[in-house]
Amino acid sequence: MAIIKCPECGHQISDKAPTCPSCGVEIAGKITRCPQCGEVYLNDQEACPNCHYANMTPSAPSRQPYYVEPVKPTPAPERPITEERVTLQDVEDIERQESEEELIAPVEETSFTQEPVVEEEEKAEEPKKEEKKKEKKPKKRTNYSALIVSIVLAMIICAVCFYFYNKAKTEKEAEAFEFAMSSKEPMVLQNYLNTYPDAPLPHRKAVNVHIKELKNTDHEWSIVMANNSKEALLDYLTKNPETPHKKNILQAIDSIDWDAAVKAKTKEAYEAYIKEHPDGKFIDAANEGIKTLKEAKPLTAQEKENISGLFRKFFQSINSKKEDRLLTTINEKLNFFNKADATNKDVVAYMNKLWKPEIANLNWHILKDYNIQRKELENEKYEYDVNFSALLKTEPKDKKLKPTETKYQVTAKVDANKKISAINITKIN
């Protein structure tokens, strides 16, 4: 094995290499070495590009070998032959004369005989040189053509390879983009951005927007879980129907509805839970509660008087702006205007809010359309659900203004201690 120069690009390679790694021309079995100058060239060339020695390898293209016609010497002028008889004496005289001429002017005779030969040889060689020049030009043209073709082929191959590589890369990026957009994990989306920094700008923008949406969704979820209200959970589920927290939301709503049914402890409440959660976690407990639930005894006249008197005292305390008397009608903690953990301070604040600076007087009037439902708890103790209407009349300090009258619907609960445990006052339009 020997190191040679590639006959096409000049790159140093082994003469046993199948092809040149630089230009791709075939090497092994396709080259020959000139026996005259040692130049390495391809077998398909007719002659050595360096010294133009004819390529005699079997695979060389067939051609006529270079042939130089030998120069014929100019013959000496022949003497005319006559029919006269030549005697021996004449022959001797001729020979003696020729020898004398040679001795007298040898230089002139030599120049006379050689000059025509040189001129004829030069004249014969001139067309041969022109033929060689003409033969050289096509060979160089052929070599450049092969080099150009090789370069063009290499460029085409590179372009095709780049096309398929770029196509595969684009398809892979598109698949990764679809997977990232279908994911609900911000880390998956961020991994796409890190893996494909040169991805199309619309894809990167869409992924960034999706990441922000997921982060906002997680923040909203944290707020909903901290609030732990059925309304907030349902609102979040409506806005995010495909949220991964859907199962947790349904379980939380199931628990909230069950707690409400247990607090109500009525047949209607249990039946409402069963209807809304047919596959609920507490379905068996709801059915059992319906079976064991005792029907409440009819409401007595004394109970009606006690309850109506309680609410009369509540509103009269607001009318007279007596805080101490007002607090005797309510629990220390109650559900006040749907605020589950309200205190006495919240009730007093409501009273003070009604008494605005521009109000001279206000009066609550109960319309006595009571609807009272009694629920038996245990040990002969009861709680009551109460509904009735009331009017609020106000008189402004400014005599130019007219008094106002507004109707309200009151919904409340009274516990076993005969105190208000929940109350909500809604304006009736």
Image: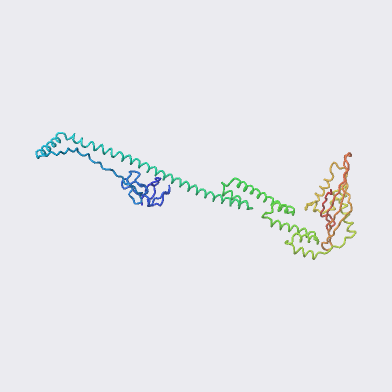
Whether residue 114 is situated above or below residue 275 in the rendered picture: above
Q: How many marks?
A: 0
Q: Position of residue 238 (x, y in %)?
A: 71, 52
| Location of residue 298 by image quarter | bottom right
**Residue at 33% in and 44% down:** 52
Q: Is residue 133 left or right of residue 107?
A: right
Q: Position of residue 273 (x, y in %)?
A: 77, 60
**Residue at 86% in and 42% down:** 359
- Residue 206 visible? The answer is yes
**Residue at 52% in and 48% down:** 163
Q: Is residue 55 left or right of residue 306?
A: left
Q: Position of residue 205 (x, y in %)?
A: 62, 46
Q: Position of residue 299 (x, y in %)?
A: 88, 60
| Location of residue 254 by image quarter | bottom right
Comparing 71 with 191, the one in front is 71
Comparing 71 with 298, the one in front is 71
Q: How is the image coloured?
A: rainbow
- Residue 22 visible? The answer is no
Comparing 377 with 280, the one in front is 280
- Looking at this rendering, what residue extends furthest in the front direction? 83
Comparing 384 with 416, the one in front is 384
Whether residue 364 is situated above or below residue 103 in the rendered picture: below
- Looking at this rendering, what residue extends furthest in the left direction? 89
Q: Is residue 411 left or right of residue 256?
A: right
Q: Is residue 24 left or right of residue 130?
A: right
